[in-house]
Structures are given as C-alpha cells and as structure tokens.
Image: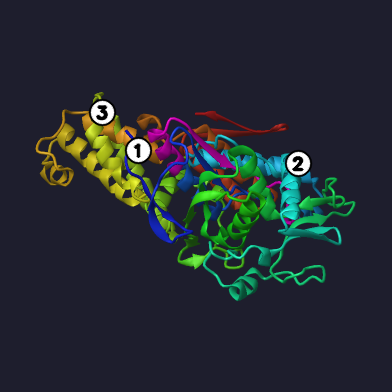
C-alpha cells in the first residue's frame, strides 16, 4: 500500500500531496555535474538528498526511473582545456570517473540513467527546431535564442518580475537579441571549440536546452519530479520550464519541483578566496569513516534549509555512526517489525524530513540497547505509542531496514568499527594524496598516507602508480 506522500513544490511554494502521473512508473530528473573539476561539498548535497528521495519512492512504487545528467560540453570545460593544455575528452573522462568514485564513497547509488550532453545533441537540435516552428525561438548571426516575451508565464517558477529576471540573470548584451532577457539555445563554435553540424551552422548547445532535451529523451514531455540545488531555480530551471512547455504545447514538463538549500562552511559561503573551499576528496581523505559521516551530517539538516559544514559537526556525525554500528554489532539476529519500520520512515513521507527520521532511528537504537544491555525503554516506548518492548534484535533489524532508505549503517559493523575499510573511500583518499603531491603539498600527502596506515591500509608507490593492501 502506498502511503500519502507530501513534498514542498517550488513552483507553488507550498506543500503538495504527491500524485504520480503513472502510479506504475514514477519518473525523476535531477541536474547533474558539469565535469571539469572535482566535486565540492555543495555538489554532493543534492546527490545525497535525491538519492534518499529515489530510495523512498522505490519502497512504494513498482518502478522508479531516476535520471541525472552529465554536462560534458560547456564553456567552463573549454576554458579548463585551454588553460591546462589537456584535451577536453581527457578532462571530462577523468572528472566523470572521479565523480562516480566520490559519490559512491558517500553511499549514493548510481541513477538509473546518466545521459551525457555530448551524446544528446540530436534531441537538442530537434527541440530547438520545434521552438522555432512554434514561434518561441529565432535564429540570428549563427545563434538561436529563446524569445522570452513569447511565453507570458516566464518568471512564474522563480517568482520574479521581468525586470528582476533581467537584473538577476546578468544577461549578455548582444545586438542580435530581440529582448535583453532572451537566452541562448545554440551558439556558433570556432575551429578550436567543440561543435556539431546544425541547421544554423557548426555550433554547440546552450546549457539550458541540454537538460530539457535529455529529460524529454528519457522521460517524455511530462514527468513527476524535477530536482536540483536552489541555486539552479533561476535562470536554469526557469529556462528549462519555458523552453520545454513551449516546445510541447499542452505539457506541464515537471509536475513537482524540489530544491535543496545551499551549503556553507563554518557559517560562510564556500569560496576559494576565503580558503574554505572543500571538495568531497578533502573530506574522504580524513579517513575511511568520513564518507558515511558526511552523509549523516547532510541528513541532519532538512534538505530545504541552508546547511553549515563544520569539523565539529562532522566529528559528531562520526560519533553517531559509531554508536549505530556498535548497537548493530552486539544485537542478536532477529526479524524486523513492520510497525517500527513504518514509524521510523513516516517523517520522510512528509517532505523528506530526514532529521526526524534520524531521531526515530536513534530511538530504535536506544530501544535495542535497553533490551540487549539492560535499561528502561519506557520513554522511547511512549514516543512510539507502544506498551512493551520487542524481543532482542527486533529493534536493531527494524533500524537496519529503515536506515537503508537513508543510505546509512549498511556496512559490516565490525569492519566499519575497525576503520571502515571501504575500497571506494580508500581509492578516493589515494587520489587526494596524488593531487596533493602534484601540488607539492607533501605534508598533506604524508598525512593521508599516515591516516590510511592507522586504519590498516598500506600504500605502495611504484612505477605504474600507487596500489594499496590491507595490513
């Protein structure tokens, strides 16, 4: 039986009851990385948030298709290639592999589909042709632009006025634009820039049309949920919505919009100029425990709220993970209790309230500890609305199944408590050490090596690279 699910819809700015377009098949699209550098902590937050959403929906619906794209054609990538001298394909291939390694180390499952922009040029061109034919786009000097005044609802998603939109977008002033707020769907490429043949000459797509075309290609003109960081609400998602509904009259595009809040470091916006810019690799290099601890830290803040990363917060999350695994390690094997699982997961059904679900998981942990090691479970039982505790091991088994929806506490308890020797986290730490050595930060490289050694992982440097073995 599917319970009632409620999520906050960015389009209506209100809590809405979720109603799948097709109850037999829920479809989700989330904006993925632009692959020119290592993922930072802000990039990781939406991956964790929407991984939990997909896990939750899969618990109730027979089929869920979760699509997260990769932007591998972009001016930032082109600039990185020019400044580094590396071929674009080398940069994107390495960065995609690094992204996959890092997200796996954070406990996130891969999406069902991961389209790449460079493999989706044909549907982008087809969608642009539809927009021109429908009177919502025009070609000018090798460019194709979306005609924003042709879509009167432009700005409704982000709740901005036309003047706000122009000011907030930092729009490019170009003589070929009919209106300052018109945005690029296609732009010309010179001989040194990646490009594809099109009806408007050799060129490349604008960023916004990429996601519209990839979601259309894999999910259709209408799908259930579109997710991403709040920073994408305008202009990216505003533009996606406009061009998608104009290309397919009568469609609604995404029926529900979900956006996660921003991530700060020590109370400040993360930036290289402030010296507080942290990549996922920086966190993973702190120890094999750090991937799950960071995931725990993310889940402690409601997804729509701003999140503050601190070292103290990460250590607190690590302690929570250790307490979870300690309870699981000593609990006897038993079957789970469906009522306890549903009670723990109920907050997720109300706008993905992970902090409250974590609190209920702590109650299950406390209950198991009281039953297994002695103590009074009366207070916890009162919160659960139960009169008597379950048999030993039942609360632990129920905890484990519910925690799986959050993507935590799924490792072997004994191995995690001995250092959490997860191969993905080890590889991420090795990659961070290699980067530190290339930057001639030998103190950091030595620190990473020593940290791994403390956790029973020996690194061996050779002519073909670095390999590791368990001590």
Q: Which of marks 1 and 2 is nearer the N terminus?
A: 2
Q: Is residue 68 magenta?
A: yes
Q: Which of 155 and 301 is in front in this view?
A: 155
Query: SS of the residue at dot 2?
Result: helix
- 402 to the left or right of 423: left
Residue tagged by mark 2? 122
Question: Marks 1 and 2: which is nearer the front?
Answer: 2
Quarter containing the N terminus: top left
Image point (35%, 52%), residue name = 316
Residue 295 is situated, as x and y percent measured from the top left of the image, at 44, 46
Image point (13%, 36%), residue name = 374
Residue tagged by mark 3? 336
* Measured Cα–Cα span from mark 1 to mark 2: 42 Å
Residue 121 in sight: yes
The image quadrant that residue 458 belongs to is top right
Q: How many marks?
A: 3
Q: Please say if 86 is above or below 110.
A: below
* Res. 403 mark: 1
Q: Please say if 85 is above or below 108.
A: below
Question: Marks 3 and 2: which is nearer the front?
Answer: 2
Q: What stretch is highlighted in magenta?
A: 52-76
Residue 415 is situated, as x and y percent measured from the top left of the image, at 40, 30
Image point (67%, 64%), residue name = 150
* Measured Cα–Cα span from mark 3 to mark 1: 12 Å
Image point (71%, 65%), residue name = 182
The image quadrant that residue 111 belongs to is top right
Residue 177 is situated, as x and y percent measured from the top left of the image, at 78, 68
Residue 272 is situated, as x and y percent measured from the top left of the image, at 61, 63
């Amino acid at each position: 039986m599917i319970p009632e699910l409620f999520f906050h819809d960015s389009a209506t700015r209100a809590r809405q009851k979720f109603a799948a377009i097709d109850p037999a098949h829920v479809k989700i699209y989330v904006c993925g990385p632009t692959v020119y550098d290592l993922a930072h902590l802000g990039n990781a937050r939406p991956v964790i948030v929407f991984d939990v959403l997909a896990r939750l929906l899969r618990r109730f619906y027979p089929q869920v298709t979760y699509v997260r794209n990769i932007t591998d054609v972009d001016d930032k990538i082109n600039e990185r290639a020019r400044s580094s001298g590396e071929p674009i394909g080398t940069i994107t291939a390495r960065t995609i592999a690094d992204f996959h390694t890092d997200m796996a180390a954070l406990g996130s499952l891969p999406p069902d589909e991961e389209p790449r922009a460079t493999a989706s040029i044909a549907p982008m061109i087809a969608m642009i042709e539809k927009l021109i034919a429908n009177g919502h786009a025009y070609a000018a000097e090798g460019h194709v632009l979306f005609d924003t005044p042709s879509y009167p609802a432009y700005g409704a998603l982000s709740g901005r006025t036309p003047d706000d939109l122009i000011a907030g977008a930092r729009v490019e002033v170009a003589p070929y634009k009919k209106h300052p707020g018109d945005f690029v769907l296609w732009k010309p490429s010179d001989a040194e820039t990646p490009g594809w043949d099109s009806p408007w000459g050799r060129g490349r797509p604008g960023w916004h049309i990429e996601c519209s075309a990839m979601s259309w290609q894999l999910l259709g003109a209408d799908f259930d949920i579109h997710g991403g960081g709040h920073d994408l609400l305008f202009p990216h998602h505003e533009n996606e919505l406009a061009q998608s509904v104009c290309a397919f009259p009568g469609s609604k595009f995404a029926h529900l919009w979900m956006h996660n809040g921003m991530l700060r470091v020590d109370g400040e916006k993360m930036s290289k100029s402030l010296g507080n810019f942290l990549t996922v690799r920086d966190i993973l290099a702190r120890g094999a425990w750090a991937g799950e601890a960071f995931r725990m830290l993310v889940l402690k803040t409601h997804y729509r709220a701003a999140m503050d990363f601190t070292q103290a917060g990460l250590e607190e999350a690590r302690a929570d993970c250790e307490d979870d695994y300690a309870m699981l390690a000593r609990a006897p094997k038993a079957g789970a209790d469906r009522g306890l699982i549903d009670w723990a997961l109920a907050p997720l059904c109300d706008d993905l309230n992970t902090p409250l679900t974590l609190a209920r998981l702590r109650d299950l942990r406390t209950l198991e500890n009281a039953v297994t090691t002695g103590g009074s479970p009366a207070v916890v039982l009162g919160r659960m609305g139960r009169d008597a505790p379950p048999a030993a091991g039942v609360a632990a088994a129920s905890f484990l199944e519910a925690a799986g929806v959050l993507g935590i506490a799924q490792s072997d308890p004994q191995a995690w408590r001995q250092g959490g020797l997860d191969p993905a986290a080890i590889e991420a730490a090795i990659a961070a050490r290699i980067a530190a050595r290339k930057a001639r930060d030998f103190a950091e490289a030595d620190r990473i090596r020593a940290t791994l050694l403390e956790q029973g992982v020996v690194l061996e440097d050779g002519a073909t690279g670095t390999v590791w073995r368990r001590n």
